[in-house]
Amino acid sequence: MPRIVRFHKTGAADVLKIEATLLQEPEAGEIRIAVKALGLNRAEVMFRNGMYLETPVFPARLGYEAAGTVDAIGAGVTGFKLGDRVSTIPAFPMSRYGVYGETCVVPARAVAHYPERLSVEEAASIWMQYLTAWGGLLHHGKLQAGQWVLITAGGSSVAVASIQIAGVLGAKAIVTTRTSAKKKALLDAGASEVIATQEEDLVRRTMDITGGEGVHLAFDPIGGPIVTKLAMATRIGGQIIEYGALSPDPTPLPLFPLLARALIIRGYTLFEFSKGDPAVMARGVAFANEHLKSGALVPRIDRVFPFERIIDAHRYMESNEQIGKIVISVP
């Protein structure tokens, strides 16, 4: 019997349980994958804690990103065959289709082939980070060569993906992190400048870097009080895109900077198009595949945990020590 991860109540990482289950057969429009690697995301930690956009239905599975091989295909599915190397795109509710386990069944529309040059661990690390970054920086942000983008939560996989995409576009990335501990690694990853927000004044440093103009785009998963600082660091006519809610504090509306700078503040999640607009998702997948194949985009894996240490992997994510993706290797 295959093993899966699920939880029966919300709470700390130790609510996660590895349990045996019957092998699930895919229904019409679905694909079953023999999983070899899992990519962890902050959304799964929030879901486990009961603080996510989706409410768990117990016993709840979880997980958005898996990579492996196709081992069963439901009726009506085309474009895939048994043995294909594939990975999953976050485009489904976790309670129904969570992928943490030795096997998972997901909608065929949420399955994609990945470039041959990638390892299975890298393949489990691509779609959430690169599609989220693509949607924020290109689809909504319209970032262009020579422009400045301010990327917060610099150690996250989406931030690293955003740095790489900014580089592909010829844009310049200012990246924030709490302390200087990650500064060199983020500069090595391609950031033009790094600001340690507990040691430096975010607004003053951003203005110094941009010659007093501010950034064209701020891309932020934190929310809370930092949004006011982002507004003050964004240039006239610029845009702030909020794609997360990591801060436990309320998020203010920075009305005066908003008015004075004629700013746009936009809420955004990948699910806008992964669940709702296949044409937009296809463009994002095509962009990512093109630059993954060329080597311009390279998934940065911070650490790989064995499947049996899923609790430790979640705890490590909550430590905020990582730079890039945390991956689970599945036997």
Image: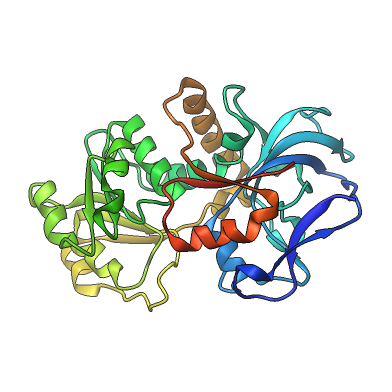
From the viewer's perspective, is residue 6 above or below residue 8? Answer: above
From the viewer's perspective, is residue 55 above or below residue 267? Answer: below
Instruction: Tell me the residue at 29%/52% (across/down).
Output: 181
Q: Nearer the viewer, residue 157 or 199?
A: 199
Q: Nearer the viewer, residue 174 or 278?
A: 174
Q: What percent of the width, then of the height, locates residue 45?
A: 57, 64
Q: What percent of the width, then of the height, locates residue 239?
A: 29, 55
Instruction: Tell me the residue at 87%/41% (across/down).
Output: 74
Instruction: Tell me the residue at 35%/40% (across/down).
Output: 163
Can I make out residue 258 in this image? yes
From the viewer's perspective, is residue 268 above or below residue 145? Answer: below
Q: What percent of the width, then of the height, locates residue 44?
A: 59, 61
Tally of marks: 0
104 left or right, relative to 160: right
Can I make out residue 54 in this image? no
Q: Nearer the viewer, residue 121 or 64?
A: 121
Instruction: Tell me the residue at 18%/63% (across/down).
Output: 232
Location of residue 84 (image quadrant): top right
Q: What percent of the width, then of the height, locates residue 1?
A: 90, 50
194 left or right, relative to 274: left
Location of residue 241 (image quadrant): bottom left
Location of residue 173 (image quadrant): top left
State how the image is colored: rainbow
Work out which quarter of the rendered image holds the C terminus and state it: top right
